[in-house]
Every structure is written in structure tokens, then in C-alpha cells.
Image: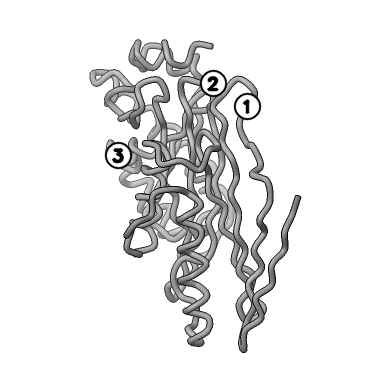
């Protein structure tokens, strides 16, 4: 059932969709509800989607990790925020006040999320934050949860330490091949200079620090790539996908056991 509440103020109105949480999880995985609030300010619609892990609007480890990530991205004070619903209420309140004052709405505009692997043991989730600060940018935060042990999986827990250098080398090799292929196409001078610079240092495009940003998916792992230039500057994918077959031997036994159904 949907209860649509309209608050009409002098410069804006806020539309609150208070609906039954949409379960975004796989049947065999952890329940994940999609909590949504939409604010309309000066004809601009700002929508916030937040995951509620276990779909109980409770103060659990997983929800607290995501709330803390939002606080870091937005710069707000965490205060007494304990649950996803409290977080959304805080957002509506702060955005209401900002719009009423006639602020230009710089800061966090919209929030969304997507779910990767969710087999009941591992839950991989990516948060997308659209931030307006002069230019519009998108910031992403990656969460790979060990549901069984209630923790965030680290790089060293997923990948064998002694295999990481070779893994980085293989990713850089694939990026080099993509750049060389793109280099055959005609492009603007600025793009050509960027490509030339990347190819001249192709062994260091992808670094161990970037290895922290990855998604565990059903059939493999996706790594986020940062070319060091604004998003959209080059018409290249910002990720590299490797199947579990390709990663055979690179993964720790612990993650292999968690990924087994």
C-alpha cells in the first residue's frame, strides 16, 4: 500500500513514498529491502534508495557499515542514526531545510545501490552517490560482506597474497590491450594525450590500492578501474571482469568455501 504525503512549502514540496519495502535479494540469499524517499525541490527530483539488510529496519552490523559510508560521503553528522529508516528521515529533514532556505542544493543529490552476489554467505553491494560540487560526480562504495561471520571481506581475505602481484599484472595487461585498440580510432587531441600517457605507464594503471574496489558477482569478480581522469573523458569501461575460472588459484580457500552454494 502506498501513502503519498505532500508537504507544500513556499518554494518546494516533498513527496514521500511510504511503501512496503521492495525485497531486492535472491530467493536463497539474505533479504535486502529497498527503502526509498524522493524530494522535489524547485522542480528538481532527488531520489534516495538505501538497502535495509535483513529487511527489518534494524541496527545490525551490515546496516551500520552502509550508514557510516553515507555519513562519510555526505559529510553529515551521524548523531543518533541507527537504522536505514532513521537515515532517510535525516536526509528528508536536512534537504527540506536546505530547500526552504533557497540553497543551491550542492552536495549529495541522489543515492542508489545494486546487489552482486547474494548466496546467503556472501553479500556484495555497491552504493552509488551522485554529488554536486561545481561539477556533477559519481562516487561509489563497495561492500563485500561475510554474512556468516558478520564482517567486511578484505582484499587479503579474498585473494592469496602471493598471487596479488600477478593478478595486478594481468589486469594491467588487459587495460593496455583496450587502450591500444582504442588508440587505433580517431580522437581529440586531449584524449590522444591522455591515452599516450597511460600507454607510456601501462604497467601502473591499476594498482594494489585500486584492488580494494571490487564486486563479487555470481560468475566472477569485477574490478573498478580509475584511469586518473574525469569519468566520461575516455569512452572505455571503468571495470574489468574476471571469471572464477580465470581467477582459479588467485582466491583464498576461505572465499572459495563462502562462494559455494
Which of the two residues, 176 or 35, is positioned nearer the viewer here?
Answer: 35
Q: Which mark is residue 248?
A: none
Res 154 visible = yes
Image quadrant assignment for residue 41: bottom right
State the residue lying farthest toward the left. 162
**Count of numbered circles in the view:** 3
Tell me what residue is drawn at x 60 percent, y 54 percent.
Answer: 36
Task: Give SS at disc 2.
Answer: loop
Residue 45 appears left or right of 149? right
Give percent across and percent down for residue 198.
37, 49
Q: Kindly report the distance in space between the C-alpha atoms of the residues bearing marks 3 and 1.
A: 33 Å
Task: Give SS at disc 1.
Answer: loop
Crowding around mark 2 (Cα neighbors within 10 Å: few <14, some 14 to 19, many 20+) is many
In the rendered image, which residue does mark 3 sit on? 207
Q: Kindly report the distance in space between the C-alpha atoms of the residues bearing marks 2 and 3.
A: 29 Å
Tell me what residue is drawn at x 54 percent, y 27 percent.
Answer: 30
Crowding around mark 1 (Cα neighbors within 10 Å: few <14, some 14 to 19, many 20+) is some
In the rendered image, which residue does mark 1 sit on? 26
Between marks 2 and 3 in the image, the one whose residue lies nearer the viewer: 2
Residue 13 appears left or right of 181? right
Amino acid at each position: 500500500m502506498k501513502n503519498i504525503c505532500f508537504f507544500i512549502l513556499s518554494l518546494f514540496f516533498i513527496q514521500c513514498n511510504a511503501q512496503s519495502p521492495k525485497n531486492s535479494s535472491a530467493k536463497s540469499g539474505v533479504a535486502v529491502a529497498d527503502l526509498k524517499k524522493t524530494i522535489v525541490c524547485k522542480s528538481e527530483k532527488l531520489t534516495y534508495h538505501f538497502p535495509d539488510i535483513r529487511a527489518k529496519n534494524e541496527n545490525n552490523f551490515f546496516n551500520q557499515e552502509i550508514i557510516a559510508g553515507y555519513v562519510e560521503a555526505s559529510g553529515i553528522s551521524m548523531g543518533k542514526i541507527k537504522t536505514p529508516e532513521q537515515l532517510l528521515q535525516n536526509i528528508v529533514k536536512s534537504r527540506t531545510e536546505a530547500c526552504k532556505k533557497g540553497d543551491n542544493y550542492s552536495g549529495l543529490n541522489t543515492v542508489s545501490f545494486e546487489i552482486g552476489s547474494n548466496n546467503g554467505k556472501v553479500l556484495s553491494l555497491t552504493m552509488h552517490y551522485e554529488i554536486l560540487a561545481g561539477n556533477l560526480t559519481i562516487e561509489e562504495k563497495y561492500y563485500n560482506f561475510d554474512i556468516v561471520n558478520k564482517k567486511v571481506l578484505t582484499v587479503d581475505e579474498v585473494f592469496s597474497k602471493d598471487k596479488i602481484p600477478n593478478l595486478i599484472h594481468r589486469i594491467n595487461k588487459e587495460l593496455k590491450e583496450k587502450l591500444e585498440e582504442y588508440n587505433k580510432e580517431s580522437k581529440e587531441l586531449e584524449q590522444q594525450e591522455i591515452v599516450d600517457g597511460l600507454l607510456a605507464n601501462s604497467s601502473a594503471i591499476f594498482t594494489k590500492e585500486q584492488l580494494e574496489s571490487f564486486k563479487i558477482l555470481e560468475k566472477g569478480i569485477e574490478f573498478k578501474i580509475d584511469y586518473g581522469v574525469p569519468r566520461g573523458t575516455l569512452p572505455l569501461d571503468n571495470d574489468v571482469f574476471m571469471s572464477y575460472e580465470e581467477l582459479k588459484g588467485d582466491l583464498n580457500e576461505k572465499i572459495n568455501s563462502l562462494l559455494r552454494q
